[in-house]
Amino acid sequence: KQRAQIGKYARTGHTLTKDYTAGARLDQLKEWWTELSQVGPFYSYFLNNSKTKLLVNTEFLSRAEYVFGDTGVQICTDGGKHLGGALGNEEFVHTFLQNKVDEWREEVEMLVNIAQTQPQAAYAAFTHGVISKWNYIFYIMDFQASATTDLLQPLKAAMQLRLLPALSGQPPPNNSM
C-alpha cells in the first residue's frame, strides 16, 4: 500500500535529489503534501516545512494561506530559487538574472587577473567551468532573448574588452558592442 500511495504522487510531481516540485489546484497540493508527510518517512524522506515554498498567484494568496496555514510552509507570490534557478514573476526572475550576471562578471574579472600570468589556466577555467554554469542557468530557466540582451551587456563587455585581450595578449576586438 505504501508504494502505491507514493507512486500515485510521484506522477503528480517529480523528484530530483530530495527536491519535490508539483503543480496543481491548492486542495490537490494539500492532499499531496499530507500524503507525502505520512508516506515520506517510510522511505527516509522527511519534509522540512520551513524550507518549503508554495508559489501562488496573488489572487490565490488568501486561499493558499487558509489551505496550508497549519503546515508551516512558506507561501509567496513573487518567486523562489529552485535547483539553482528561479521560478516566479517577471520581476523576481529579472532580479535573479541581474544578480547572476553581476556574479559572473566578477568571475570574468578574476580570470582576467589569472590570465596575466597563466592564460592557459584562465582559458581552461573559462571554457570548462564558467561557461558551464551559464549554460546550466539558461537551460533550466525560460528567458526571453529580448529581455536578457540588456542584462547580459556588462558580461559581454567584460569578455570582449578585458578577458579576450588578457588571454590573447592582443588589444580588444574593434567591433561595435
Image (tube, helix red, strand yellow):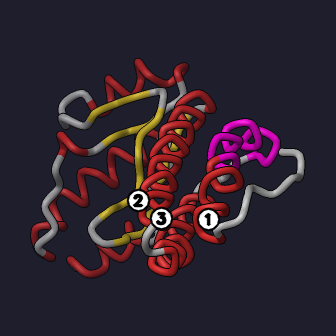
Q: Would you say 1 lies left or right of 94 here?
A: left
User: What residue is pinned by disc 1?
Assistant: 139
Magenta-drawn stretch contains 146 = yes
Dominant secondary-structure state across the stretch colored magenta: helix
Residue under the image location 67 percent in, 44 percent down:
152
Q: Which tag is nearer the camera, tag 1 or tag 3? A: 3
- For marks 1 and 3, the one nearer the N-term is 3
User: What residue is pinned by disc 2?
Assistant: 83
Magenta region, residue range: 144-157
The spot of residue 35 in percent (x, y) is 25, 58
Amino acid type, mark 3: Gln
User: What residue is pinned by disc 3?
Assistant: 116
Magenta-drawn stretch contains 81 = no
In whole angstroms, how far apart are the C-alphas of marks 1 and 3?
Answer: 32 Å
Q: Quadrant of the N terminus?
A: bottom left
- For marks 2 and 1, the one nearer the N-term is 2
Q: Would you say 98 lies left or right of 77 here?
A: right
Task: Return the residue nearer the eye: 59 or 77.
Answer: 77
Residue under the image location 51 percent in, 74 percent down:
119
Task: Return the residue nearer the eye: 103 or 45.
Answer: 103
